[in-house]
Image (cartoon, grey):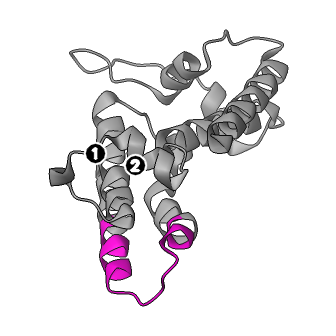
Amino acid sequence: MDHEIDRRIGASAEVMQSMYWSVVVKKELNRKSIYVPTLTYGHELWVMTERVRSRIQVAEMSFLRRVAGRSLRDRVRSSVTREELRVEPLLLHIERGQLRWLGHLFRMPPGCLPGEVFRACPTGKRPRGRPRTRWRDYVSRLNGSVWGEGATQLFDERIIAIGMHFDKISSI
């Protein structure tokens, strides 16, 4: 999974470099239509460890600083740059997409492969050492609720609540 995230960050860096030499003036439009989709392609299945979160945030802020015409030497906080550009953090966009995918998984009828894989309980021996964080464990921690009968409704309500939270952020 780290290899895929490395590829995504590298591809977004290439996009950023090509946009630097572009004659298109609207960099915010390029961010929404080119940069963010390139960086977040397939993000629904990423396990967001602290290392991955940090790398994504670094890549995003590198782009936002370039759009704002700043460098690290200007020593301006990331939150100030985000407020000036009126941009929501990319990590929140990723978490919202992961919860949306989880809602799809819960609503899938029996027999659909992604739903079956999600519900499967593998058997066998695991390798030595600390178990890696599984996607299911990560999303349950992200959601903060218990799996069960009313899970579909809980996830739908959670996604709506997150959407309202984003509306408040974007209106600031």
Nearer the N terminus, badge 1 or badge 2? 1
Image location (x, y in percent) of residue 94: 54, 42
Nearest the camera: 140 or 56? 56
Q: Which residue is situated farthest in the bottom direction here?
A: 23
Which quadrant would residue 168 be assigned to in this image?
Answer: top right
* Crowding near the residue tagged with mark 2, few <14, some 14–19, many ≥20 C-alpha atoms within 10 Å: some
Residue that numbered label 2 is attached to: 81
Q: Secondary structure at mark 2?
A: helix
The residue that label 1 is drawn on is 76
Label 1 vs label 2: CA separation? 7 Å
For the stretch drawn in magenta, what is the main secondary structure? helix
Q: Which residue is drawn at the image coordinates 51% and 73% (left, top)?
A: 30
**Three-letter amino acid code at the position of disc 2:** Thr
Residue 159 marker: none
First to last magenta residue range:
13-31
Three-letter residue code for mark 1: Val
Quadrant for residue 172, please give it. Answer: top right
Q: Say which of 40 and 122 sits in front.
A: 40
Residue 70, quarter of the rendered image: bottom left
Q: Residue at x 39, y 66 (%)?
A: 67
- In the depicted structure, whether residue 108 falls above or below residue 7: above
